[in-house]
Amino acid sequence: MTHPSKRPVTAVIVVAAGSGERLGYGMPKALVPLGGEAILMHALRGVVAADVARQICIAVPKGDTELRELIAEFTVELVDGGPELTVVDGGSTRADSVRAGLAALEDGTEFVLVHDAARALAPERVFQRVADALASGAKAVIPAMPVVDTIKTVAATGDADSGIAPEIVTGTATREELRAVQTPQGFDVATLRRAHDAAALFDDRQSAAVTDDAMLVELQGVPVHAVRGASQSLKITTPLDLIIAEGLLEGPLGIRWVEG
Ligand code: C5P
């Protein structure tokens, strides 16, 4: 084990500024209750338990007061010597929220893990795998899972009224080469800042196509390494996801039984 003083200075940015419209609760997704506690609190407990971060920077919706109050209460629970919590206003896109987090990192931060609050049950071991790969020299690391479905590309046929189908298949990807990508994604801070500075100049169409941080780093030509993710890191997006997450929390053996 590395001596604590020799550990690289690592921060975790938790993005929690999404509206959560697809969940249909009429409140920010991070506030939606899961097992009696807000989604964000599960995510924060996971980050603290992983023990990789000196600073946790949380992006919340602009104008929010409720998440800020929960974070303030959580800060009181943290033991001396625990991570520093910083709260920032998120932006209108996920990438804007990450940029707000990057701007608030303490000087001297070497590595940053970017984590979706919506992946509230991501286990400690995934944070540690990502942090270990960074400590071994990777500039960018993602947790990834094999894909079980066959994935095809499609295009609109433009004849939705023809009675056949609105889309036509244009190809089938080789499943063995595909991975479903999760968070926390880890980066050398300077590398991620460069990638996000470049993305800040994107037009609306390009911005809409940005779905994770690693793709911005890929555009810079930086190799992105993949470590194993975990099934319970599912992104809570739809009501069904919330039911699954509740089931993982309430299962007879807790969430520990899940492989990965
Ligand atoms: O919307 P989606 O589920 O892809 O969001 C992924 C994560 O990014 C969520 O944790 C959400 O809170 C966060 N997000 C954000 N700022 C936005 C949009 C999404 O922090 N403007």
Image: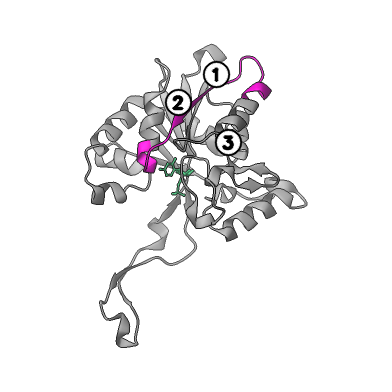
- Look at the numbered disc 2 and give the secondary structure of its residue: helix
User: Horizontal and vertical percent for residue 189?
Assistant: 36, 26
Say which of marks 1 and 3 sits in front.
Answer: 3
Residue 172: quarter of image = bottom left
Residue wearing tag 1: 2
Please name the amino acid that badge 3 sits on: Glu
Residue wearing tag 3: 66
Tell me which colouring the rendered structure shows: one colour
Q: Is residue 213 located in the magenta-colored stretch of the structure?
A: no
Determine which of the numbered discs, if any, sits on residue 42 in the image.
none
Say which of marks 3 and 2 sits in front.
Answer: 3
Please name the amino acid that badge 1 sits on: Thr
Which one is nearer the viewer's eye here, 119 or 22? 22
Which badge, 1 or 2, is on the more N-terminal residue? 1
Q: How many marks?
A: 3
| Residue 140 visible | no
Residue wearing tag 2: 135
Q: Identify whether 69 is placed above or below 184.
A: above
User: Horizontal and vertical percent for residue 131?
Assistant: 49, 30
Q: Are marks 1 and 2 in contact (CB under 8 Å)?
A: yes
Which image quadrant shows ligand 1? top left
Q: Identify whether 153 is placed above or below 257.
A: below
Query: Cα distance, mark 3 to mark 2?
Result: 36 Å
| Residue 86 visible | yes
The residue positioned 21% from the left and 46% from the top of the image is: 203
Q: Which residues are magenta?
A: 75-96
Q: Identify whether 207 is placed above or below 131.
A: below
